[in-house]
Image (cartoon, rainbow, N blue to C red):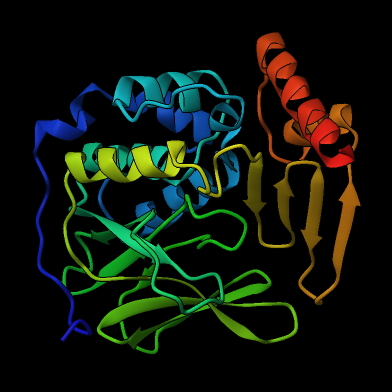
Amino acid sequence: MYATAPTFDIDHSPEWGSDRLDLDAYLRRIGYEGVRDNSLKTLQQVHRAHMSTISFENVDIAVGRTVSLDIAELERKLVHSGRGGYCYETNLLFAAALDRLGFPVMRMLSRIREGDTRRRFRSHTSLLVRTADEPDTVWLADPGYGYAGLIEPMPLRDGARATVGAWSWELGVDDGHWVLRSQDGEGRWSDLYVFRPERQYEVDYRAAHYVSSTRPGSPFVNRLVAQRGSETVRHRLRNDVLVTDHPDGRTERAVLAPDEVVAALREKFGLTLTDEDVSLLLGFLQRGESAAAC
């Protein structure tokens, strides 16, 4: 029953704050200079530009700051301050930009699998989008997943496959859910996440975000995470461990000193970090070293 394309239209609800987004500043941030319309080509280009510019990262959560999903705060942090964010931040910013460009967007919450089929609570956000020139096709868009996420949107069809650069993805249906899979450098497929095409509201995101950013045991609480993927390489940072995946299946793993972690966040993940950010990060990493030594 979930293998059919859902129907939805442009969401004009003021709860997302899309009308307050400085679209010019956002497009400058991601380096997009193309046509501003609601065509498939624009969707693909803006998605790719966002994915390649705004990294997945949870620096604020790791160092104990409160993270807001208000559009003004997302713009301040991700657009004007040169930072990234985790999925709620980056995908809600992207969705607001799509609203401004005239795309019908459905905001959803998804269940992470990462190769594990245990049923987890819905902790990831992904988007369904329609375009003006292909009105009968729904596109899965998700520039905020992280290292293995989609570089460009893919059509919501059972068995659909997409390849960008060295990486491939496919969509299927499992237990009444759509499932997005990714292929690794050795040709093996693994589930990234599953979802049902059900519209979520701002209150749903506030609840899921609160759990993900404050609950002990969350993968983002008391843990530094940064991820970035491109056509040719994927980087994953967890606390002081940097993992680099290559298309031929090679994986490099390096344990970094605290100052090297800061350098990696700037150089590998493109983050602009203030002196305060660096001070808090070094304190966080040094506490982790002390705990590991006990």
Q: Tell me the quarter of the picture where residue 262 sits.
A: top right
Note whether 1 is above or below 201 in the view shown.
below
Residue 180 place in picture, x, y as percent: 44, 75
Taking 179 as reference, is 62 left or right? Answer: right
Going 89% across and 38% down the picture, which residue do you hit? 293
In the current view of this chain or complex, which residue is farthest to the top?
Answer: 275
In the current view of this chain or complex, which residue is farthest to the front?
Answer: 294
Taking 247 as reference, is 113 left or right? Answer: left
Q: Is residue 78 visible?
A: yes
Residue 235 place in picture, x, y as percent: 73, 53
Going 73% across and 47% down the picture, which residue do you hit? 237
**How many labels were placed on the picture?**
0
Note whether 67 is above or below 157 in the view shown.
above
What is the quadrant of the N terminus in the image? bottom left
What is the quadrant of the C terminus in the image? top right
Taking 140 as reference, is 151 left or right? Answer: right
Taking 233 as reference, is 13 left or right? Answer: left
